[in-house]
Image (cartoon, rainbow, N blue to C red):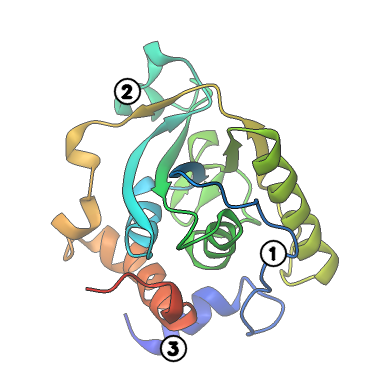
Amino acid sequence: MNKIILSMIFGAIFASGSKLPSPATDVKAPATKQTAVFAGGCFWGVEAVFERLKGVSEVVSGFAGGSKSTAHYDTVSGGRTGHAESVKITYDPSQISYGQLLQVFFSVAHDPTELNRQGPDEGTQYRSAIFYSDDEQKRVAEAYIKQLNDAKVFRRPIVTQVTALNGFYAAENYHQHYFDQHPNEPYIVYNDAPKVKELQKQFPELLAKK
């Protein structure tokens, strides 16, 4: 995808072309590995973004927001399960913070101003959501959304839900690492590759060493 198209995609989202501000509030770094669960449209591209960050040891594509019995791709695709396509990120907070993950999530992983859709995908299963595992994650996520809205960095209001994580269920194996396994698939080329390129452009300091 050429630079003009990339500019159109990401320029249409932000009120200015500048990088999003860092969160003013962050989670106090514990001594052990932590997890974060985000939903931002099709999990293929979101997974690809977070897999490339330093301090991230694992990213799993899956479902959150509904029950275990309906956590299957074909069922979730119907849009009636309450699930959202999500990713579970395991990370080392001594290398990357929860706030930095949020900054990447809102900057390049998806468009947080689109309600119940991302790009060509429509339905509540593609909604923007942060599934917090404790009060600290909730506090930081809500504070960052307020910070971004107050600064009017987006042309439209943020519609990201902040809700308690009641369970995360991994998707079928063929969905895992889909971006890297199918780099030439048209959906990946036009919808997800630009996210990875924008990550590399905006956050070189957060990229994992190859």
- Identify the residue at the far right of this view: 150
Which secondary structure, mark 3? Answer: helix
Q: Residue at position x 43%, y 73% from top?
A: 199
Which secondary structure, mark 1? Answer: loop
Q: Give the vertical position of 136 relative to 13 (above or below).
A: above
Which numbered disc, 1 or 3, marks the residue that appears first in the sequence? Answer: 3
* Tag 1 residue: 23
* Tag 2 residue: 72
Look at label 2 and name its amino acid: His
Look at label 1 and name its amino acid: Pro
Q: Residues within 10 Å of mark 3 (few under 14, many from 20)?
A: few
- For the residue pair 30 and 35, the one nearer the viewer reads as 30
Q: Residues within 10 Å of mark 2 (few under 14, many from 20)?
A: some
Whole-angstrom CA distance, mark 1 to mark 2, is 34 Å
Mark whose residue sits in front, 1 or 2:
1
Q: Position of residue 96 (x, y in %)?
A: 48, 61
* Tag 3 residue: 4
Mark whose residue sits in front, 2 or 3:
2
Residue 171 shown left or right of residue 23 in the figure: left
Q: Quadrant of the C terminus?
A: bottom left
Q: Residues within 10 Å of mark 1 (few under 14, many from 20)?
A: some
